[in-house]
């Protein structure tokens, strides 16, 4: 493979090109009219404009991209994540054009794209699943009976969904019909497929995913887990590897399961198998993502493996040189996604021009970004500015480096998730590792970020709790405040 076209933009396009460059492979960037001056365009050896700003007129035009690839003598296409990365038809068209698709075969993409097909195959191989229906719901009354058997709350999921899209929680039988109707119509309009199924809603799990690599010779390995429980509206914000709760035994068990899932769809390339993990160590297979993921760098940091390089070697038909026994977790890595969003106001997009943009540097800090000072954040695409990744010999060191890097990061021109990241990494629940998928809802209020000084925040929180307790005892809040504030403030007995 001598020339690779990257059918993507931003940080991931640059990330892929970096590995290409290291391997002596030429790169071709594609870009929309909005990205004419973007860093990924300049980083590439050659670049071609595919169309107007809107994704469906540029980055999603698979056949047009393939046409350009043919004209430019490209022999491999890397899709990155998002856009065309999990489009089986695109993968097929690339192959039909005589170009290597750097990713799995169309049938694996298709099978894992259907959550029902994936679960059916997993079940046939004794992979643990969340209790639920095995087929698309045809009959509302049958479904209701099953829901009652499983026990509420239940989740309705779209078979063509994934990543939390088209998911609905049903708390009681009373809501069932209404939620089912909504789920089906949403699934139809969003995915063109109204098939839905039911699962028991696991209320406080951790979201753990396992990275796998599979070559074309039947060798499959896993590169341990990523802990991805810290999400808001099914968008991950903080990820880390390894997870603080996996024992070596559980890691092996989940890793073996992930390898089995990859084998049962004849997987090729880099993929991720998602699980829910309960407090009692029960785990369930959820779905498989048939692409390189946003958070792949934390796995690279702790395993020492360049995942993009491996994808390319595998696509060339080479045998995996890495053996499962050779892999060892080294240290700890954390990723914070830096979004152009205002966490104080419900994570609303906060676009603008990056008047100041200075990235942190130094020991154990990696920034994967696609922006530079003076650039405007385009409204057309995902508002992620950068991924801030830190590495340490242990978790404490990785956390310390992340907090230091957040302080060094200078962004003026839009709100970002950097202050939110600091809030998470300073939170007792995060530091102790005692958290689950409810972390953001349970522990975060936008207003928490308005208190700058952590000591001040701690004092305010403790005072509030103390005063509430007194209030309950005395019944008169004013009296409590005057009395207690006067007598206790200086002695800090409540701290
Ligand atoms: C679930 C679940 C609980 N029970 N399924 C979200 C992403 C997608 N891959 C699957 N997801 C979940 N599926 C059952 N049966 C919990 C999640 C989930 C989640 C749910 C609410 C709030 C945050 C979450 C973060 C990760 C996963």
Image (cartoon, rainbow, N blue to C red):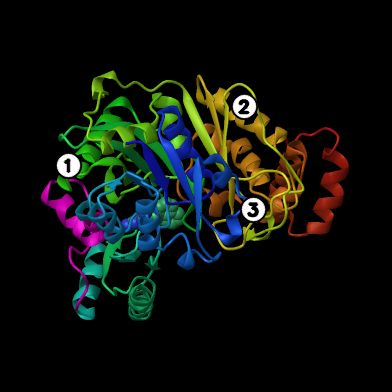
Residue at 67% in and 29% down: 404
Residue 201, quarter of the rendered image: bottom left
Q: Quadrant of the C terminus?
A: top right
Q: In whole angstroms, how far apart are the C-alphas of marks 3 and 1?
A: 39 Å
Residue 345, quarter of the rendered image: bottom right
Q: Which residue is mark 1?
A: 263
Toward the viewer: 355 or 410?
355
Residue at 58% in and 43% down: 42
- The label number, if any, that marks residue 394 in the structure image: none
Q: In whole angstroms, how far apart are the C-alphas of marks 2 and 1?
A: 39 Å
Q: Is residue 165 visible?
A: yes
Residue 211, quarter of the rendered image: top left
Q: Quadrant of the N terminus?
A: top left
Crowding near pointer 3: few (<14 within 10 Å), some, many (20+)?
many
**In what element is the residue under mark 2?**
helix
Residue at 36% in and 72% down: 172
């Amino acid at each position: 493979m001598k020339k690779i076209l990257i059918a993507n933009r931003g940080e991931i396009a640059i990330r892929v090109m970096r590995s290409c460059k290291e391997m002596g492979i030429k790169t071709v960037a594609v870009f929309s009219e909005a990205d004419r001056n973007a860093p990924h365009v300049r980083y590439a050896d050659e670049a071609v404009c595919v169309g107007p700003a809107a994704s469906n007129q540029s980055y999603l035009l698979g056949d047009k991209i393939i046409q350009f690839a043919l004209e430019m003598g490209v022999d491999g296409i890397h899709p990155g994540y998002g856009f065309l990365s999990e489009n089986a038809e695109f993968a097929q068209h690339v192959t039909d054009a005589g170009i290597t698709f750097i990713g799995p075969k169309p049938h694996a993409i298709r099978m894992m794209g259907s959550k029902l097909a994936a679960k059916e195959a997993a079940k046939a191989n004794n992979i643990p699943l969340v209790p639920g229906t095995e087929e698309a719901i045809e009959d509302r009354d049958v479904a209701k009976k099953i829901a009652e058997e499983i026990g509420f709350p239940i989740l309705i999921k779209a078979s063509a969904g994934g990543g939390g899209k088209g998911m609905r929680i049903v708390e009681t039988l009373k809501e069932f019909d209404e939620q089912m109707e909504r789920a089906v119509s949403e699934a139809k309009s969003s995915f063109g497929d109204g098939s839905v199924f039911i699962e028991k809603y696991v209320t406080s799990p951790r979201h753990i995913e396992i990275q796998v690599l599979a070559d074309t010779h039947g060798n499959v390995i896993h590169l341990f887990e990523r802990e991805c429980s810290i999400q808001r509206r099914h968008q991950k914000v903080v990820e880390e590897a390894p997870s603080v709760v996996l024992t070596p035994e559980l890691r092996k068990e989940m890793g073996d399961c992930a390898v089995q899932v990859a084998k049962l769809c004849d997987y090729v390339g880099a993929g991720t198998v998602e699980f829910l993990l309960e407090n009692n160590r029960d785990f369930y297979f959820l779905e498989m993502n048939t692409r390189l993921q946003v958070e792949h760098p934390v796995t690279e940091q702790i395993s020492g493996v360049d995942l993009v390089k491996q994808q390319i070697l595998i696509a060339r038909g080479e045998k995996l040189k890495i053996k499962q026994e050779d892999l060892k977790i080294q240290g700890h890595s954390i990723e914070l996604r830096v979004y152009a969003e205002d966490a104080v106001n419900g994570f609303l997009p906060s676009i603008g021009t990056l008047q100041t943009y200075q990235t942190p540097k130094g020991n154990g800090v990696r920034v994967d970004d696609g922006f530079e000072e003076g650039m405007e954040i385009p409204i057309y695409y995902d508002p992620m500015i950068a991924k801030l990744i830190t590495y340490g010999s242990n978790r404490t060191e990785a956390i310390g480096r992340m907090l230091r890097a957040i302080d060094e990061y200078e962004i003026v021109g839009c709100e970002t998730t950097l202050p939110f990241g600091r809030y998470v990494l300073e939170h007792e629940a995060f530091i102790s590792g005692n958290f689950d998928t409810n972390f953001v809802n349970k522990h975060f209020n936008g207003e928490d970020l308005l208190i700058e000084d952590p000591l001040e925040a701690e004092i305010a929180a403790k005072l509030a709790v103390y005063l509430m307790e007194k209030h309950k005892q005395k019944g008169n809040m004013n009296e409590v405040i005057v009395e207690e504030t006067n007598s206790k403030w200086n002695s800090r007995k409540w701290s």
